[in-house]
Image (cartoon, coloured by chain):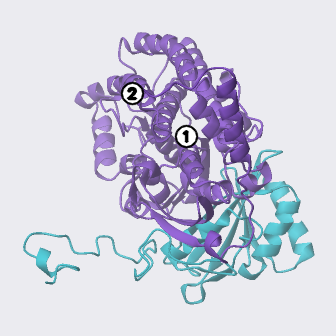
Amino acid sequence: MPDATALELTAQELLQVDSGSILDTSFHRGRAELVASPSAIRSVLRHLKDRGYSALASLHGVDYYPDEPRLGVIYEMLDMQRVDRISVKVRVATDAAEVPSVVELFPTAEFQEREVYDMFGVRFDGHPDLRRILMPEDYEGFPQRRDFPTGGEPILFTFNEQQTYGKWV
Amino acid sequence: MAPEKPDSGGGQAALTEDYRRREASVTISSEPAGEGETHELMTLNIGPHHPATHGVLRLLTTLEGEIVRDIVPIIGYVHTGIEKTAEDKSYWKVIPVVERMDYLAYYFNAMAFCGAVETLLGIEVPPRAQYLRVIHLELNRIMSHLVWLGTSALDLGAISMFWYCFREREKILDLFEMSSGQRMHTRYIQVGGVFEDIPPGFEEKVRAFCRDMPNRADQYADLLEKNEIVLERLRGTGVVDQETLLGLGVTGPLLRATGHSWDLRKAQPYSSYDHFEFRVPVGTIGDNYDRFRVRHAEFYESVKIIEQALDGLPEGPFITPDRKVALPPRHELATSMEALIHHFKLVTEGFRVPPGECYYPIEGPRGEYGCFVRADGSAKPARVHMRDPSFINLQALRPMVMDNYLADMIATLAMLDPILGGVDR
């Protein structure tokens, strides 16, 4: 992990290329994190990739309900040569949940971006095949959002079995 | 009338030569398809319930004759919303649900989750607990590879391997039962340490297993290494170069088979892995045979680690003495009011974790298991996400099988070793 100073230097470097690309930095329990602006995420990741963070270890979505902007997408970058990790986060609101896709830079993001879309409803612009991946194609709603209830589907018992989908006849 | 036996010597050689000549005339070129009778494409649905897909995986394959021209994996059939369920439970109740993600690597799931929570809490894990974790993680790795080897050989038509591998797997499950009471989904790794110290007699049984296992692995190699069918089906099939695999985020034995020595146990040691001497087996060209050899070689290395961990097993507590996180010992409850309060608070509410985020990666039998945990200060995690290697590695299936025979796809899928519980979570 880069230490707090190295993190700030990286942030300054990115800000020199594009002022407004980095909104914030945080360093907590050894985890170095850059908060990037959603529109600049491709250039930030490309810059980090050129600096040696050539692998995208993981990509995941987070819902910060009730904070705004609610949704977050986190990119865990990995430098395999120096064994160094840095996280990049973008925050978007639920009514404008659009983030540029990074599949061209990191092909590994294809399934993971589909999963974030499926679970949180973040649309990735430029993704080659943005469909639901784990939930059924005709599913409504985004189940990993914090305001999505658990146990929303009726439990099947003998008395209501005949009323359920596919058993109408 | 008895059929005439083909004469040995020249006749046999001529037959082989003729076969090789006809085999060489078959081209697997990627010329544009769709014109004329010979270029007709057929879409074949494999799964979701198919014995060769190792779980509920559905593959939409587009075939030209016997050659795969396109493949689309369709997943989600065993999605059970474990990540959502985890947000509704206190931290220590999350461990059994995350263990059920990748059902062959339950110690690894629990280790990744507990490691993330420990980082957020900032607590030290006692050395004895770290060693006990290593022993069980490596036993789990051998167990997972045994299931992979048995079922993969089954896909290639070798049924006896399955029985041999499951015989050894039973021994490991018996060891798990001895140390934790469960054979699968043991909930042995806890936040701050492990559930219980190992019982008397456990060490001898593990040592006996470690003496036995290298011989067994030798026997597997003897059975498979000289088998013409296995060699023909594994060698040179499913080759993908290292660059493509790195781009697709593939880790674990699949990446090491191409000669890349990336192993988190060496690169970024956790849980005292830097105390042990072991080698990281790597392959050369990254075909199915290399994948088989890399995993097979890991049997020996895991046994070495277990033996070293037993030799150097430190004395001391097996779980952190921090009463805010770990349950007090049973005997203290009868004498100490404070212990009773701690016990009550932990069992009813659980412990609170200060706000923060953590990504904790470990090296599992299939690659990098990384658990992302976001804590919001309450007793329940606000987000748990598992970066499961099966899910990521499945993306590499397409480049591995494109423009190759359908029969090789079955062998490649077996060597890819996806666990659908981990893919769908």
Q: In this rendering, is residue A159 above or below B424? A: below
Mark 1 neighbour density, 10 Å: few (under 14) some (14–19) many (20 or more): some
Residues at badges 2 and 1 in contact (C-beta under 8 Å)?
no
- List the residue tagged with mark 1: B123
Q: CA distance from mark 2 to mark 1?
A: 81 Å
Secondary structure type for disc 1:
loop
Q: Chain of mark 1?
A: B
One can see residue B313 in this view:
no
Q: Position of residue B318 (x, y in %)?
A: 45, 26
Q: Chain of mark 2?
A: B
Residue lying furthest front: B1
Q: How many marks?
A: 2
Shown in purple, the chain is B
Disc 2 or disc 1, which is closer to the eye?
A: 2
One can see residue A103 in this view:
yes
Residue lying furthest left: A159
Closest to the observer, A30 or B70: B70
Closest to the observer, A30 or B6: B6
Closest to the observer, B326 or B293: B293
Shown in cyan, the chain is A
